[in-house]
Image (spheres, helix red, strand yellow):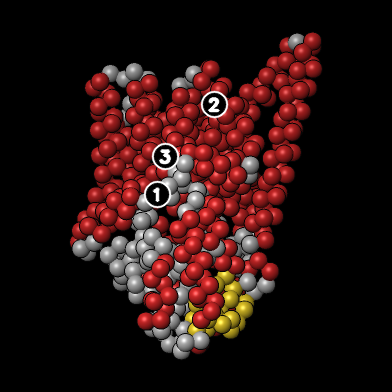
Amino acid sequence: MAILIFGFIIRSITLFRAVRGDEGSFLYFGWMIVKGRVLYRDLFNEKAPGVFFIAAFIFFLFGKNIFAVRILSMFLSILTALIIFKIGVKINNPLMGLISAILYEFEPISLHYSTIVFTETFMIFFIVLAVYFYIPAHEKNSYRHYLFVGSLIGLSAIMRQTGAILLVVIILHRFYNRDTPKRLLQSIGMLIIGVLISIIPIIIYFQAVNALTDAVYDIILYKLSYSYGFTLFKTLEIFINQVFLQNVILWIVGLGGALFALERRKQYDFFLVAWFLISFLVIIVMSTPYDHYYIQGMPAISLLGGIFVEKLINIHENIVKGNSQSIALASTIKWLLVSFALIGSLMYGVSLYSDMKYAHGLPYQIEAADYIKSHTSPDETILSPDAAYYLLTDRENKYKLAQLSAGNIESFGISDLPQFLESRQIRYIIFDQYSVRWRFNEETYRNFFNDEIRAVEVKIVFEWILENYVLEKTFGSGIEEIYIYHSQLW
């Protein structure tokens, strides 16, 4: 409990970070749902609907309160660590559970995204809960438990589509345990029925509001057609730079735990290894550049890491107690564990320091939004790098996009942006350093996405904007500056 409380305090430090990217979409669309808009029919987004509805529910209860949704995300992250501890206790012992919970609780990527409203935190909570209840379902062959596990998998998929991968892991585990055909079919059938119990109400809702076709296109068809065109080499390069180097200790102990698990082959060792490998494989196949996608594999690798560290501790204790001639090896293991702890703490400190640098942007966003509200009419369209500004300025984007920016090439068309700005007489554009560095930077598309055509288009459009708009007001300081540009045409 002390570890969980400390984790909550650490996370709360970054509650005031700026709202950017997907989080802005989740919050803005949630607010639009409260105001009567229908997801996918009136609002375009390729994400699964779960987090939008959660944000809408929190806003319905507490008003337009960003902190309420973020605190819920933090709380679910803390509960996930607690459930991981319980899983470790069930499949092995309290020591493994404790180590696994610590590895997840202070894992830098999960730590960072737990104070941002992202799909991964919500999806992982339901996945880990499903794993916890899968253990008694497997041991008792309880179809009632399988039904509940299936419903939790369905909820995880509603949070993010890849939550459904746990269904594949469980089916493989059932095959691995050589169930009889009858038991195998019954357990799989109950899992699928449980998934349908969670998903069918969502389908009925979208059908009732005439948005089912839009939902299928956005969530499934658009997602399948969407690709960055990355090579496998580029994907691995991104993984090493964004994920592995941030958390090398977890990957070392996790892969070490996978080797131990494959060697000893206890009841759930194959399940943990399959869970991790399939999660990782899905990310590689999707060819995604974003580090937060890897969070879905963190619970499994944390549990495998718990196996590895617990094994080293046991080897150390056995050597010291049973064979005085092996003191040197025991000392080596001890220093290895100490090194893991020190390097892990150093990496954690660097990650926390990095987070702290970006932990004060929200007040500046609120100031910029208040300025826009006082200088424009309520229904006037603005060009914003993030949907957060539509939420903060109490206005609606009329064009079915999460945001109107050069970065939204896929859904808007960057070459049409200057004509749009002129024809709609857009007076104000909001920039921040993140949008200039990411959405409006041609080098991002050239080097990161390996897309020369988009890089040239972004450069042309951004130069056109700077020629036709003048800086009117700046908010914030340092790396959290926000710029308000005013059109010279109107």
Residue at disc 1, secondary structure: loop
Q: Are marks 3 and 2 in contact (CB under 8 Å)?
A: no
Residue 245 appears in the rendering: yes
Instruction: Point out the tag, 1 or 2, that comes first from the N-terminus.
Output: 1
Callout 2, which amino acid? Answer: Ala
Residue at disc 3, secondary structure: helix
Q: Nearer the viewer, residue 476 or 285?
A: 285
Q: CA distance from mark 1 to mark 2?
A: 31 Å
Q: CA distance from mark 1 to mark 3?
A: 11 Å
Residue at (74, 38) in percent of width and height: 342
Residue 227, numbered circle: 1
Q: Which residue is mark 2?
A: 258
Residue 137 appears in the rendering: no
Instruction: Point out the tag, 3 or 2, that comes first from the N-terminus.
Output: 2
Q: Decide: few, some or many residues near mark 3? Use Cα within 10 Å; few <14, some 14-19, many ≥20.
A: few
Callout 3, which amino acid? Answer: Val
Q: Which residue is mark 3?
A: 285
Q: Is residue 261 above or below residue 299?
A: above
